[in-house]
Amino acid sequence: MRPRIASAVAAASVALALQACSASSATTPPPSVKLTVLAAASLATVFPQVGNAFHATRPDVTFAFSFAGTDQLAAQIQQGAPADVFAGASLKYGDELLAARLIEPYRRFCTNRLVLIVPASNPAGIASLAELRSKSYKLVIGSDTVPVGSYTRTVLGNLDAVYGAGYSAAVLGKVVSNEDSVTSIVAKVESGEADAGFVYVTDALAAGAKVQTLDLPTAAEAVATYPAAAVGASPHLADAQMFVDFLLKAAAQRLLRGAGFGPPPTS
C-alpha cells in the first residue's frame, strides 16, 4: 500500500472510532439514583404521585418512600438510618433536626388542618362537635408525641372558648386509644373499632365514602405546616435538594392541592 493511501486509511479509521465513541457516550444514560424519602404518614397517598412527577423530569431518579409518624422519622434520622429526604408534618421536628445539623435548611411546602371523622354508618349518631361533650362514644386520637395528636390537643383547648370551659377535658375523657400515626386513626374509625377520630382533612378525603366528616370552627383550627429538607448525610445531596425544591413547583403543588393540602405559608 502506498504511504499516502495508508495515511488516508488510518485517518479515516481514527475518525470512525471517534464518531463511534461520541455516539456511544451520547446514548449512555446517566447513572441511576434512588432517593430514600422519610415522610409523614399523611403524605402516603400523594407523595408517590409527586415522585412520579419528578421522575418525569429526571428519569434517572427513582424513589423509596417510608411513611410513619413524624417523631418516628426524626428518631430514625437521629439514629443514623440511611435517608436522603425528610418531609414531616410539624416544624418542631424540622427545627430539632436542623439544630442538630442532621438536615439542610428546610422548606415549608404545604399546610394541613384537622377534621373529625366518624364511620360511614355513624353508629354513635354524632351530628355535631358540641355533642362530643356529653354523648357516649369511643374516640381515637394521635398520641401527644406525634403532630396529629399535638394539633388535636391544641384544637380541643381552643374549643373550650366555643363550647365552654371543660369541653376539652370531657372529650379527652372519651379517648380509648392514642395512635402513633394518622393512618392508624383512620383505620380504626373505618373498621368501626372507634366511633370518631381527629385526623387531617387530607386523610378524610382519601378515605372517601368510608367516613363522614365534621369540620371544625375556623377559630379553633391548628394549622399544620410541613417542612421538607435534604438529609445532611445523604450520598445524593444535590438530587435530594432538587426534589425538595420541586415540592414548591407548580406540578407538585397541583398534586398536593388536589389531595386537600393547603398552600405553604407566605412568611
Image (cartoon, rainbow, N blue to C red):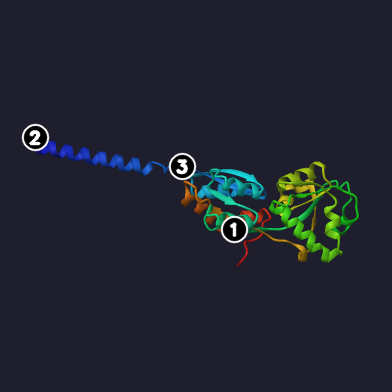
Sequence-first disc among 1 and 3 = 3
Q: Please identify, in this view, whether the residue under mark 1 or under mark 2 is nearer the observer.
A: 1
Amino acid found under the numbered disc labelled 2: Arg
Residue 50: image x %, image y %? 58, 50
Q: Check whether the beta carbons of the residues at disc 1 and disc 3 lie within 8 A of each other.
A: no
- Taking the image as shown, residue 124 lies to the left or right of residue 110, namely right
Disc 3, SS: loop
Q: How many C-alpha atoms fall within 10 Å of the one at disc 2: few (<14), some, or many (≥20)? A: few
Q: Which residue carries the number 2 mark?
A: 2
Quadrant (top left, top right, bottom left, bottom right) of the C terminus: bottom right
Residue 157 x/y as whole percent = 79, 61
Which numbered dot is residue 226? none
Give the residue type that dot 3 points to: Ser
Indicate which disc residue 32 carries: 3
Nearest the viewer among 250 and 143 is: 143
Residue at the spot x=20%, y=39% of the render?
12
How far apart marks 2 and 3 lie (CA) works out to 50 Å
Specify which label sits upstream in the sequence, 1 or 2. Answer: 2
The label nearer to you, 1 versus 3, is 1
Quarter of the image with the N terminus in it: top left
Amino acid of disc 1: Asp
- Of residues 43 and 58, the one nearer the viewer is 43
